[in-house]
Image: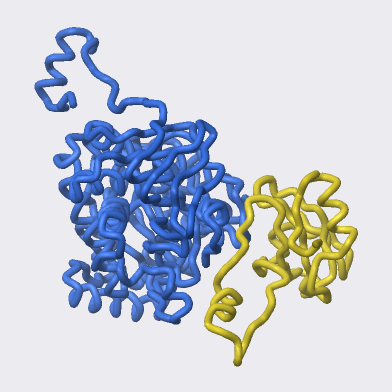
Chain colours: A blue, B yellow
Amino acid sequence: MQRYSVFAVAREAMRQHTGWHRAWASRAPRKSYDVIIVGAGGHGLATAYYLGKNHGLTNVAVIEKGWLGGGNTGRNTTIIRSNYLQDPSAAIYEKARSLYETISQDLNYNVMFSPRGVMMLAQTEHEIRGYQRTAHANSLQGVQTEFISPQRVKELCPIIEIRGPRYPVLGALWQARGGTARHDAVAWGYARACSDMGMDIIQQCEVTGVRSENGQVTGVETTKGAIGCNKLGIVVAGHSGVLAEMAGFRLPIESVALQALVSEPIKPCMDVVVMANTVHGYMSQSDKGEMVIGGGADGYNNYTQRGSFLHIEETVRALVETFPIISRLKMLRQWGGIVDMTGDRSPIISPTPLGNCFINCGWGTGGFKAIPGSGWATAEMIARGTPGPLAAAFGLERFREGRFIDESVAAGVAH
Amino acid sequence: MLILHCPYCGVDADETELAPGGEAHLKRFGPGSSDAEFEAYLFQRENPKGVHFERWRHANGCGKWFHAARCTTTNEVFGTYSAQVTEPPRDIHDKITGKRPGWLSRWLS
């Protein structure tokens, strides 16, 4: 692999940038692999990467029906945090957040991780109590968060109106080590590292069927022909239900559109991420100067990747009160991603009723922040055949056993 | 914007007037059922990419619940019908088959 460094940039600057190589190889599928991962988004690529790095499995293909990172990995608001209430969630999200700190060095690819701090506003008395509880839980879990006063909120983010008539800011849960990263770079960095280990990343190859014999998976049928495998990992977010149907089982998942938008670029005016869960809106400023705004999810199943006007209006209306400065900004772009919602708003990392077929899904509205930890845990499960400590609590059987990891109260809709 | 015809008050209602109620025609399991049946009733969903039957309430209108048949990829609405049925009526089936030839219904065998 061609290493990226300041010397490489200087060298290429001297010769008109003619010496750069392709970041990853584009290969035709082979007849069979040890492991096939369906879905080349962040989670799928991270799974493949840690299969190679932590478990020495490199005869791996990652199959993608569209283009690399073109699903939710390229459609989120890039927020990274780990201030969850329940122990299993805090463990996996904190693992992910801590991996993000060194991932650029690990992958030799700058993912522009920016630990600028994340604050979740408390705008009702109930939220104050909820976030104080989360702060206490986090200190027991070893996750650094604190509950801060409205004055501290104003110091950290001067553009917030803390005395709004409908939604005053009464405090906030502050995670100084949270932040954002460049979402596409996460997918690209993992893809480059996977390709370097000899894995095949096969884009524009849609899985149309799952092959099995005696209850064990034997391969997949795709638009580029049948491909055999010993183990199959399904990591397809919003389309998990479609793949599960091919594999012959049903999931406790419903797919809905979640949308986000960015404003026209303006000069730097906020250097933290702010989430307001009462009003279902969150905002940060990108390096380009755009205000990145995320909103609530649609209330009904759909695969449209655009979302409804209603929710944009709701989100923006509420945010304008908290951030009066944005009231005259123009919207530049709006888009939607299909998120896979589970009943308890926690993910599924689990073996499935089909032998040697594993699934990673259900990240709902908050998958981006979890990518490295999710890949780490899923790779461990696929390599060993059973979930390791990070994934153990996230099995499919929890819905039958009533053993939920209930984050719908802790996290609200905004993940 | 999604517009559904309320079969009770006859209004073509915008999405802003309506409250979604999730997958329709679930069979309810309660005490005495197996764990698998209860899990399926509570959590497992068809979540189809295509024709979907669902429950809606005309919340900011007449307040009544009703059913709708809608495509989840295009948001095309095939029709709405009474809440007092346990499976989609024949005419809705025919409409869907007219627009989506080859469509397989789990209620017709």
Residue drawn at (47%, 56%) of the image: A319
In the orientation shown, which residue stands out farthest toward the left?
A7
Q: Position of residue B60 (x, y in %)?
A: 73, 69
Left or right, residue A137 beside residue A284? left
Left or right, residue A115 beside residue A169? left
State the residue in front, A2 or B104: B104
Instruction: Give the quadrant of residue A135.
Output: bottom left
Instruction: Give the quadrant of residue B79.
Output: bottom right
Q: Position of residue A360 (x, y in %)?
A: 40, 57
Left or right, residue A407 beside residue B64? left
State the residue in front, A356 or A96: A356
Q: How many marks?
A: 0
Residue drawn at (50%, 62%) of the image: A341
In the orientation shown, which residue stands out farthest toward the top?
A15
In the orientation shown, which residue stands out farthest toward the bottom?
B31
Instruction: Answer above or below: position of A19 versus B53.
Output: above
Q: Position of residue B89 (x, y in %)?
A: 86, 65
Quarter of the picture containing the N terminus of chain A is top left
Instruction: Answer above or below: position of A267 versus A21.
Output: below
State the residue in front, A149 or A274: A274
Left or right, residue A280 beside residue A287? right
Q: Position of residue A307 (x, y in %)?
A: 59, 50
Q: Is residue A360 visible?
A: no
Q: Is residue B96 visible?
A: yes
Residue drawn at (47%, 64%) of the image: A353
Residue drawn at (78%, 58%) of the image: B4
Quarter of the picture containing the C terminus of chain A is bottom left
